[in-house]
Amino acid sequence: MTHADPMMQQGNVNGGPAHAQTGRGPAPLHPQVRHGAWLNRDLLLGLGVLGLAAFFFIGALRIRISPSYSHIGPRFFPFLVSTGLGACGIGLLAQGLRQLKSGAAPAEGEAAEPPINWVSVSLTAAAVVFYILLLERAGFIAASTVLFSLVAAAFGARRYGLAVLIGFILSFTAYWAFTQWLGLRLPAGIMRPILLWLGGS
Amino acid sequence: MLLPKQRAASVGVALLASFVLVLGLIAPALAQGAVPNSLRIMAPASPGGGWDQTARYAQMVFRDARIIPGTVEVFNVPGAGGTIGLARLVSTERGAGDLVMITGLVMVGAIITNQSAVSLAQTTPIARLTAEYEVIAVPANSPFRTLDDLLKAFKENPRAISWAGGSAGGVDHILVGLLAKEVGVAPSDVNYIPFSGGGEALAAMLGGHVSAGVTGYGEWAAQIEAGNLRALAITSAQRVPGINIPTLIEQGVNIELANWRGVVAPPGITAQQRQALINAFDRLHASPQWQQVLVDNNWSDFYLSGDAFAAFVEQENARVTAVLKEIGLAP
Amino acid sequence: METLGMLLDGFSVALTWNNLLWALVGVTLGTIVGILPGIGPALTVALLLPVTFGRDPIGSFIMFAGIYYGGMYGGSTTAILLNTPGESASIITALEGNIMARRGRGGAALATAAIGSFVAGTLATVGLTFLAPVLVQVALKFGPADYFALMVLAFTAVTSLLGSSLLRGMTSLFFGMALGLVGIDLQTGQARYTLGMLEMLDGIDVVIVAIGLFAVGEALYAASRHGRVASDVIPVKDSIWMTKEDWRRSVGPWLRGALLGFPLGALPAGGAEIPTFLSYSLERRLSRHKDEFGKGAIEGVAGPEAANNAAAAGVLVPLLTLGIPTSATAAIMLAAFQQFGLNPGPLLFQNRPDLVWGLIASLYIGNVMLLVLNLPLVGLWVRLLSVPAPYLYGGILVFAALGTYSLNHSWVDLATLFVVGIVGFIMRRCDFPVAPAVIGLILGPLAEQQLRRALAISQGDYSVFFTRPISATLLAIAFVALVGPAIVRFVSGRRRRAGAMAA
């Protein structure tokens, strides 16, 4: 997970332009000097990317090579890609170390990010996990209603009853439209008796 | 569409069927002609492919010919050459007497190459339905006029002959493997170029980027008829009526290969349930509607049910395993 | 003009009330499913196939074509407004389009996408009408070596998408390529990185990665900023329509997008994504407002949107003339032809001219319908931005999950979606551009297959890439695209220095 740095509290609270996709955030306003830090974001990311590269490199050694003729075998690209990924990891690592040495804040964007709202993120992530667990057991409508309501709560909806109601109507409509008109199969789950009563399937 | 007379007749059949069914419930010993009340057909592939089409046509005929009294439903469980559907059939659907899954030669190969934990031996074979034969073709401007020309060149300089076909380990690849074995070319010298989906392979053939190609006859039939591709051989035992292509056997290559499709049921069903499913497919096969489906789709009738089909599956498994071992796709 | 006569006959088929109704149903349905993330035209046509069983083939095909075109229009809407592209061909649209939307220019972005789609779709349909037989002959000349060269060119176009940090962009690109390695190796049939799971054998679906990185990643990212940052989205500024300036800046990209998209879409191994990469990169190079790219340049929406719609028409060239499907939707349409006992290919034009020309005529009509349908909706769509965040993100996730589950009915896909979503969140949080990962996932496997195919056919002779005219030309363009800007910078830098000295 991301390393939430307690030193980085001075986020751009009023919000500048969103820059997540292209990485064109405004430059940090106040390059901060940190003392005694031994780990920073790029260092951590570099380690993560290197780990991923190692996984793909070692995995490449375990790909079987078939005796059929092929000039370039199934391992060539995995080696190429894992090497490239590894090089990127080393680059990030080096960038992290450089920042540590100079004691400067990273150049890219971090200063513009406010600290993570862990409650909202966890609730949103939990909503997706619940959905995966519920879908095939409780059915699409129930799972989707839970997903919708939890996400709504994560984003600060305070009228829970209304959120559940909207979620239910949305899920029910989607279920009905896709199963009845398009013939998509979705798990009915606990709603089966009611759906059958309504003449659906 | 059904004519009124036919409709009346099929209503009669349906009434008779339900009567027989009631009898069957009362006296199982008399239930020779019983069919399941309702049926689910699993197509272990995405909508649109050959297995899906087989499932949908069977559904249509079961309905139109009034063979199954209740609902007939088709659903798709795609992935990994059908082995995901197979795994589901063997595990969660165990004992379900109202379910069949479409299967075929492609799945026999996929079970081996994917090292699937479950195999067709664990299912309850019901019936073999259709076959599509493979065709060996070359681009229209190819120097190879006959199969002999092609195989001679293949023998002399095997790697110079690039074979276009479907995915590695599939029916097309198996045929090329069998050909190599027949003419004595080492598998490590077979230059097989897999393409995903028939379209890409066809484009490579029409553009003359490969020396030869192998696929199900239906896929390239239009191009062969239009003269854009030259068909050299077909893999049926005898010539297929309406297709003017010599067989491999009549050209002295002793290979017969049918890309067959059939249905299997989950394990753990009762003997009565199995017999009811076999009865249902026997009636499907006997119906004029099904015969029309075969004609419309260029599918050859390849019907075989019950124990004979089970023996056939075993035999195919042995043959395919041997070839795939040879080309390095089976452990 | 023989073709013109045929086309007129086609219009007489397509303009019956019945078929107009089918077209309307198709484009409406297509627009709706295009908007929903993960539920694209391919799935919709596949689901509707059994429904059309035994009905009139002409009406069915007119409806399918409407769904297909409509999906392309609809795909851009959520990409622009919510940064959640519904399918892979609208990922590029999301880049500039979403930034425009956040700055209150969502209406203009939607309008340029819709009008661009109409212009390019119509031009490409004209191309399909008159050039199909010629174009298909050219397209068949593309062999594996030429495709590999095309992939190299597409990779160089990616450099304009890497964002501010080359290192971070490359990491994202390699990450996507690594994901592309998972699954059965097509050339040898060996499993790679499947961790022993059957579900992984078919690889990781691009749709899942696109929805995961964009929709789920974006939702998690927005959650992480919830309550910390005041919403920076300006629903609508000034007018929702395009200004005169917008028009002036959009016309060029529309036309160039159509010119790129149609022929590349017609290639038997093309698809609609590559033209969008190339179009974005081209517009960025040609634009007089280079500094606006990455901050909401309208050219970056107009070009790729035109390109993907033109490619959609291009895809019909090999489908109708040869029976070769080159996209997921085309593959389902081919199955539809077979369902009706028809074989697309050289004989279809002779045997069923009513169907072929009725279908082509319906494309013109469908395009007009889509424009008429979509332009008034622009005003409605931009209001999506005023839906309160809790319900907006709840809805996005419900449909993202539905779309993912509908692919294979497998919880493994949902788990993959979740993991990819977490990665997307980390990437956003740590300033990695997301688009290169999706592009790597699309281009990586294509490049690998074509390279290995080319070398297997040539038996290891690398010279094929330079002796084949198409391949050599494409590689030369790629080289110029990569090195050209550096040379220009170098020369102009010297000139400036020389000028400074002289002054």
Image: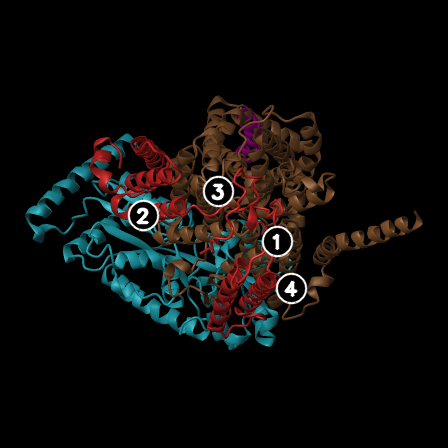
Q: Which residue is mark 4?
A: B143
Task: Give the amino acid type for the residue marked by disc 1 in the picture.
Answer: Ala
Pointer 3 with pointer 2, Cβ within 8 A: no
Residue B118, compared with residue C140, is above or below; it is: below
Would you identify the image quadrant in which residue B7 lies?
top left
Q: Secondary structure at mark 3?
A: helix
| Residue B140 x/y as whole percent | 62, 57
**B155 falls in the magenta region:** no
* Chain drawn in red: A
Measured Cα–Cα span from mark 2 to mark 4 = 63 Å
Q: Which residue is mark 2?
A: A130
Q: Which residue is mark 1?
A: A107
Task: Give the amino acid type for the residue marked by disc 4 in the picture.
Answer: Pro
- Is residue C477 in sight in this rendering? yes
Tally the numbered discs: 4
Q: Give A42 or C334, whichever is nearer the viewer.
A: A42
Measured Cα–Cα span from mark 1 to mark 3 = 50 Å
Residue C99, compared with residue A47, is above or below; it is: above
Q: Which residue is mark 3?
A: C333
Q: Give C60 or C266, whichever is nearer the viewer.
A: C266
Q: Residue at x 69, y 31 (%)?
A: C1
Task: Give the amino acid type for the residue marked by disc 3 in the picture.
Answer: Met
Give the drawing colour for chain C.
brown
- Is residue B220 in sight in this rendering? no
